[in-house]
Image (spheres, grey):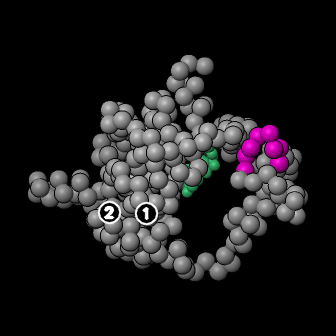
Amino acid sequence: MNETMQTIHSLRTIHGDFSDREISEANLEQIIEAAVRTANASARQSYSIIVLDDRVKMKDLFGYQGSRALIFNVDFTRIMAAARFLGQEFDNDDIIGFITGSIDTVLAAQTAVIAARSLGIDSLITNGLHRNQLDEVYRELYLPETSCFPLITVVLGYPRKEPDFQKGRLSTRHVVHYGTYHAPDDDQLREIVAEYDDKSRHMGFINDWERLGFEHYLDWFYVKWTGKPVKEKIAAGKVLEFQERLQKSGFWWPTGK
Ligand SMILES: Cc1cc2nc3c(=O)[nH]c(=O)nc-3n(C[C@H](O)[C@H](O)[C@H](O)COP(=O)(O)O)c2cc1C
């Protein structure tokens, strides 16, 4: 493997908190410079990055802390402000804009993760912000109410403890389709279930599902991790909060603007 491949294949998430060791400003700058090199649609770079160094604030906002956190927002406010500045019109805060902006945003976040790892710095990608009250997140970060949505956070630092193992993935044949899409048949589904059950692959979040009364890891996953599917798709709780926030930001509206 070349060095880039080695870096990518050595990626692992640090769950929980990082150590007190700080990353250098020079490394932080390199990570951010790499992130903003990422491809982006229509040269808009429709994201913004908030850099946090306050560990208490990190913990309050998304439940984890490290040397730095990079909060990646889908953000059209900059390009909209530039349009106003020039007396032009621009409006991309609709669902298509949100999807395209989200792609720009997560690609930049993943580039930060890879760049960090190449410098010996570990990371945690977390959507912990979304478990917080979104109103509170907007208030704490002074986020613009419209055309901006906090999508994903990358916490950077050095591990307090090295992970015991690297987590596995499904065999690529289960996720790659050549030429056209092929729905999995029962044989393939049996293999997929078996891969999750193979403890040496470290695929899931727990490894004692039999002790907990489940035949397969995925049985535990569907019952205990994801919970029962919602029969009536009426938005409630977090879903409603997301819908309302996306409507407020202008990215989503149910029946027309
Ligand atoms: C969108 C997203 C959200 C995640 N949120 C969390 C999180 O809140 N807490 C956490 O410990 N890990 C989180 N993770 C990390 C995953 O749990 C981790 O990537 C997965 O278990 C595979 O492990 P690995 O990255 O070490 O290979 C998140 C990852 C992604 C992509």
Q: Amino acid at mark 2?
A: Leu
Residue at 41% from the left image edge and 54% from the top image edge = 55
**Mark 1 belongs to which amino acid?**
Leu
Helix, strand or loop at label 1? It is: helix
Disc sitting over residue 61 in the figure: 1
In the figure, is residue 236 to the left or right of 116?
A: right
Residue position marked by numbered label 2 in the rendering: 141
Q: Position of residue 215 (x, y in %)?
A: 89, 58
Residue 235 location, quadrant: bottom right
Residue drawn at the location 36% of the way across and 54% of the way down: 54
Image vertical order of residue 225 relative to residue 73, above or below = below
Number of residues whose C-alpha sits closer than 10 Å to that of mark 1, classed few (under 14), some (14–19) or many (20 or more):
many
Which quarter of the picture shows residue 42?
top left
Viewer-closest of 40 and 177: 40
Position of 200 with respect to 33 (left or right) is right
Q: Can you tell which quarter of the image residue 222 is in?
A: bottom right
Disc 1 versus disc 2: distance between alpha carbons?
9 Å
Identify the residue shown where x is 80% and y is 39%. Answer: 200
Residue depicted at 23% across the width and 53% down the height: 79
Q: Residues within 10 Å of mark 2 (few under 14, many from 20)?
A: few
> What segment is highlighted magenta in the picture?
197-204
Q: Is residue 109 left or right of residue 144?
A: right
Residue 143 part of the magenta-drawn span: no
Q: Quadrant of the C terminus?
A: bottom left
Tell which circle, 1 or 2, labels the residue nearer the N-terminal end.
1
Horizontally, is 138 left or right of 214 in the view? left
Respond yes or no on whether mark 1 lies under 8 Å from ligand 1.
no
Q: Is residue 226 visible?
A: yes
> Disc 1 vs disc 2: Cβ atoms closer than 8 Å?
yes
Residue 161 in percent (x, y) is at: 60, 42
Residue 47 visible to the viewer: no
